[in-house]
Image (cartoon, rainbow, N blue to C red):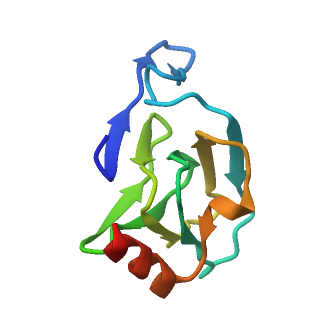
Amino acid sequence: MRDAVLVNFPVVKDQRGNISFIEADKTVPFNIKRVYYLFDISGGAERGGHAHKSLKQCVIAMSGSFDVLSDNGQARFKYHLNRPYQGLLLTNMLWREIDNFSGGSVCMVLASEHFDEADYIRNYQEFLQVVREK
């Protein structure tokens, strides 16, 4: 898996409404061990601001829109998410920031591991140092 890549999930269209689905190890390339979501986000708020040593994620705009910054220590890319059938796959050792939330947005995250504070790098300079050492 590349550092960050946009993926489209299957969509089943129906006159009554559409259905999209996500399957572990199929539509996302990892076993999903945790799901969490951000909501009621204040205007101008930023989330993320960290990297993970081993955890992989898929970030989805379930409602509304927001931007995700992905930084591998050498290049930075910004992705605008606004479709509930599209996700941004983020591998480990990527600095990520989420901002530019629209009103009423909901950000759902699928994670490859259970929560473990020891997996986080919360200081950008420390992140850059770890990346350089690899």
Q: Taking 13 as reference, is 98 above or below it?
A: below
What residue is drawn where x is 44% and y is 42%? 87
What residue is drawn where x is 42% and y is 54%? 81
Q: Taking 67 as reference, is 60 above or below it?
A: above
- Give residue 110's quadrant in the image: top right
| 27 or 122, nearer to the observer | 122
| 1 or 18, nearer to the observer | 1
The quarter of the picture where the C terminus appears is bottom left
Is 64 positioned to the left or the right of 35 in the image? left
What is the count of numbered marks?
Answer: 0
Residue most toward the front?
A: 133
Q: Position of residue 12 (x, y in %)?
A: 45, 14
Q: Position of residue 98 (x, y in %)?
A: 52, 68
What residue is drawn where x is 50% and y is 73%? 100
- Give residue 62's quadrant in the image: top right
What residue is drawn where x is 33% and y is 44%? 6
Residue most toward the bottom?
A: 125
Q: Taking 104 as reference, is 84 above or below it?
A: above
| 13 or 89, nearer to the observer | 89
Residue most toward the left?
A: 75
The quarter of the picture where the N terminus appears is top left
Q: Position of residue 93 (x, y in %)?
A: 44, 61
Q: Position of residue 107 (x, y in %)?
A: 61, 53
